[in-house]
């Protein structure tokens, strides 16, 4: 593909309700979008870096800098053989996976459009199964003002059709919360996400939840740790899942080698894109390690690409890929809605991402836009 021009957008969207995690509340979601123009087509990608360096060291500001000063100049005006050629072309920049992943998503979108197939079909091409038409999804519930309110919110999402619930926890907001949720919903698949807020010494907190039949405990320890998770794992009954710690297929390999987890949450953005995410898929599938696709409150642009990944055969657990109306009143694409009968989202089957940009809404939420030609 001959990359003629790349547009970079900074957009800001108000969340329907604040999303609170162990690193604080978020009411406004800013992100970047890239539009890569090549051979008469346009591929779109979403950079999920947030305003604050909480989940990752990357922010909207660092991503704008790295994209506009380094990554985009390396691509604009160049030709690229295909999605797999992108990472080598960007390897001169260390780290910054969220910035790189936006370009990776757009290049996959372009490659799929060029072939007239869906992103999911192109990504699933190596596998006999082909992509799933629908993928199982759950919902990630931020920290609420009280346990009673959390139980109410769970009830609202269950009534809306969600078949798996994830609760954010932090020290002091853990065992009692999980116990109340389990008591109110004895058979519901419930999991917890600590976003690295605990230490190995907190093992007794997790042991106190051993009897709750939780689906999994996500990223309790350090955001770069793999080793201490391998020490925590044999001490608890709840399956252990890694999110923040897995930045690459190599990290997944280390985690498998030392038994650091039972499950991996694959966020394509966190691992610099879909090519690397698929490597993790292949590695974990061969090792029988279950996977699911994580979320970062994506717009419909990012959501479509998450669905393409979740359609691969190794993604056997429900992902954090909720219907978009739970985040935004009006998205920049047509909304994704929940199939209530089986707690799934339908994987787009049109060419590329398979979503149309609502340019009127995009203009309304754009704070800054720049175009880079080769
Ligand atoms: O840890 O999975 C996480 C959102 C922002 C940052 C980190 C995480 C999350 C979520 C939300 O849990 C998932 C979603 O609904 O997109
Ligand atoms: Mg997480």
Image (spheres, grey):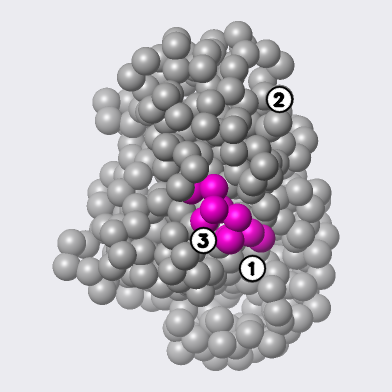
Quadrant containing the C terminus in the rendered view: bottom right
Q: 10 Å neighbourhood of mark 1: few (<14), some, or many (≥20)?
A: many
- N-terminal label among 3 and 2: 2
Q: Which mark is residue 97?
A: 1
Q: Which residue is mark 2?
A: 172
Q: Which mark is residue 293?
A: none
| Label 2, label 1: how far apart the Cα atoms are | 32 Å
- N-terminal label among 1 and 3: 1
Of residue 297 and residue 252, the one placed in the foreground of this image is 252
Q: Which residue is mark 3?
A: 268
Q: Position of residue 365 (x, y in %)?
A: 72, 44
Let me know if residue 227 is in the magenta part: yes
Of residue 145 and residue 132, the one placed in the foreground of this image is 145
Residue drawn at the location 44% of the way across and 60% of the way down: 259
Let me know if residue 229 is in the magenta part: yes
Q: Secondary structure at mark 3?
A: helix
**Residue 105 located left or right of residue 58:** left
> What secondary structure predominates along the stretch shown in magenta?
helix
| Label 1, label 3: how far apart the Cα atoms are | 9 Å
């Amino acid at each position: 593909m001959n990359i003629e021009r790349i547009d970079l957008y900074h957009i800001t969207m108000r969340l329907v309700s604040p999303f609170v995690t162990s690193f604080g509340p978020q009411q406004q979601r800013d992100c970047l979008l890239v539009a890569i123009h090549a051979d008469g087509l346009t591929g779109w990608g979403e950079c999920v870096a947030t305003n604050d360096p909480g989940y990752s060291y990357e922010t909207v500001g660092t991503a704008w800098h790295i994209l506009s000063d380094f990554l985009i100049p390396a691509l604009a005006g160049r030709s690229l053989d295909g999605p797999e050629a992108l990472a080598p072309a960007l390897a001169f920049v260390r780290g910054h996976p969220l910035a790189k992943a936006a370009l990776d998503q757009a290049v996959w979108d372009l490659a799929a459009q060029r072939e007239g197939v869906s992103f999911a079909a192109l990504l699933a091409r190596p596998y006999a199964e082909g992509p799933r038409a629908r993928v199982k999804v759950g919902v990630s519930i931020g920290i609420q003002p009280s346990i009673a309110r959390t139980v109410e919110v769970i009830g609202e999402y269950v009534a809306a059709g969600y078949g798996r619930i994830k609760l954010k926890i932090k020290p002091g907001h853990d065992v009692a919360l999980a116990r109340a949720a389990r008591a109110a919903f004895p058979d519901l698949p419930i999991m917890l996400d600590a976003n690295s807020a605990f230490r190995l010494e907190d093992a007794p907190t997790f042991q106190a939840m051993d009897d709750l039949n939780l689906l999994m405990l996500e990223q309790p320890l350090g955001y770069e740790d793999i080793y201490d998770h391998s020490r925590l794992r044999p001490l608890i009954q709840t399956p252990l899942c890694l999110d923040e710690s897995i930045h690459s297929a190599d990290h997944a390999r280390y985690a498998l080698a030392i038994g650091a987890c039972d499950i991996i949450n694959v966020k394509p953005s966190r691992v610099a894109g879909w090519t690397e995410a698929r490597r993790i898929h292949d590695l974990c599938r061969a090792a029988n390690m279950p996977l699911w696709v994580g979320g970062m409150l994506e717009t419909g642009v990012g959501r479509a690409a998450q669905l393409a990944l979740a359609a691969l055969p190794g993604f056997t657990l429900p992902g954090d890929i909720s219907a978009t109306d739970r985040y935004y009143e009006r998205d920049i694409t047509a909304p994704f809605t929940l199939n209530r009968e089986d707690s799934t989202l339908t994987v787009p089957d049109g060419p590329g991402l398979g979503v149309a940009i609502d340019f009127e809404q995009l203009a309304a939420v754009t704070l800054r836009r720049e175009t880079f030609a080769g």
